[in-house]
């Protein structure tokens, strides 16, 4: 995933996190429509790509059917059941205990920066919030966190993020979660790092951040930049003109610019990957 980020970025409008097989998640069977059955048959035959979600239409009611995800007990924490649904311009996550009692209700404003969203746009993002909702350890603390798409395009997505706080035994939206929500194509990396990326057509870039913090400080945890790479494109967006790499050392950026006159886009992105090592 990390070595082929240039390919993945092109798909991340739908599966930027790509974590639906996470070790914590047990996804309940959803209400199966005739269309979904056809998609499942096609997938079994190898004719449907695994990253394409079935387009369920829910414009009329403004809400899609519910999805249920179970989080098994781990690390001394109780098992939880997530009931995920949508309503108008909101994604809703009802967090319940094993007895079915709601212990927390989380809401995600969909297309929150677009006050003039059309019914079709809202229907599309409701579907993505429901179908692409993921449970994954985003902050490298060995506890499951939550992320649901709040807006997306052909090659990008941004998420509502909730991080699990083992002290309070609740999902919280702290400063770190708010930073993650601003990132395009959020991707957790090893060693407490997070990346954001964007794929053209004018400029392609990737940035890597490290989660840092000290208990008792404010904010207690935050993202600080580690590395970034920008592939500048020539007018028209067909060929790269330069690769600009920035590394951050003691809060200072060290920038290197490499001319890319003889590179194609694949070679330029490979240069980004090599520069990170």
Image (cartoon, rainbow, N blue to C red):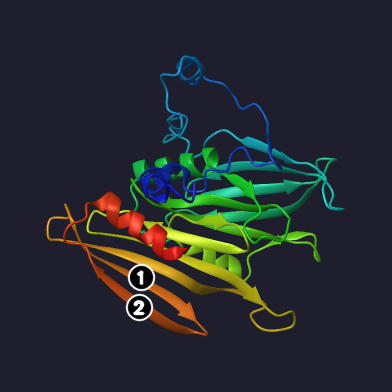
Q: Is residue 55 visible?
A: yes
Describe residue 207's horizontal placement relative to residue 131 as left or right. left
Q: Nearer the viewer, residue 270 or 109?
A: 270
Crowd class of label 2 (few under 14; some 14 to 19; many from 20; radius 10 Å): few
Q: Residues at badges 2 and 1 in contact (C-beta under 8 Å)?
A: yes
Q: Is residue 91 above or below residue 172?
A: above
Which of the two residues, 225 or 84, is positioned nearer the viewer here?
225
In the picture, measured across the screen, residue 152 lies left or right of residue 74, that is: left
Q: CA distance from mark 2 to mark 1?
A: 6 Å
User: Is 92 left, or right, of 96 in this rendering?
Assistant: left
Side (left or right) of 263 relative to 11: left
Which residue bears the numbered disc 2?
Answer: 255
Q: Which residue is situated farthest in the left direction here?
A: 235
- Compared to 45, does 254 lie above or below? below
Which element is circle 2 on? Answer: strand
Position of residue 154 measured from the top left corner of the image (x, y, whole percent): 33, 45
Considering only order in the chain, which callout, 1 or 2, is on the residue closer to the N terminus? Answer: 1
The answer to which quarter of the image holds residue 215 is bottom right
Residue displayed at 32% across by 65% down: 230
- Give the residue number, with chain letter if any, for mark 1: 245
Residue 52 appears at what percent x and percent y?
A: 43, 32
Query: Residue 179, position in %: x, y?
Result: 53, 69
């Amino acid at each position: 995933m990390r070595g082929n980020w240039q390919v993945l970025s092109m798909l991340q409008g739908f599966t930027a996190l790509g974590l639906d097989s996470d070790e914590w998640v047990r996804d309940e069977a959803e209400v199966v429509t005739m269309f979904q059955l056809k998609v499942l048959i096609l997938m079994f035959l190898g004719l449907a790509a695994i990253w394409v979600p079935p387009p369920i239409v829910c414009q009329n009611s403004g809400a899609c059917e519910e999805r249920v995800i179970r989080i098994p007990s781990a690390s001394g924490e109780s098992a939880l059941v997530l009931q995920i649904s949508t309503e108008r311009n909101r994604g809703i996550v009802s967090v319940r205990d094993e007895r079915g009692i709601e212990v927390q209700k989380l809401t995600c404003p969909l297309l929150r920066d677009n006050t003039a969203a059309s019914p079709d746009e809202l229907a599309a993002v409701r579907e993505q919030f429901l179908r692409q909702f993921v449970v994954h350890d985003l902050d490298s603390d060995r506890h499951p966190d939550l992320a649901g798409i709040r807006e997306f395009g052909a090659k990008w997505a941004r998420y509502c993020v909730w991080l699990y706080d083992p002290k309070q035994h609740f999902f919280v939206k702290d400063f770190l979660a708010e930073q993650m929500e601003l990132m395009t194509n959020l991707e957790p990396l090893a060693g407490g790092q997070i990346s954001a990326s964007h794929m053209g057509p004018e400029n392609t870039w990737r940035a890597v951040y490290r989660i840092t913090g000290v208990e008792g400080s404010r904010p207690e945890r935050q993202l600080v930049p580690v590395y970034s790479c920008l592939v500048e494109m020539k007018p028209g967006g067909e060929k790269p003109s330069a690769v600009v790499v920035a590394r951050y050392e003691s809060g200072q950026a060290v920038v290197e610019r490499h001319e890319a006159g003889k590179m194609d886009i694949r070679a330029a992105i490979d240069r980004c990957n090599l520069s990170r090592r």
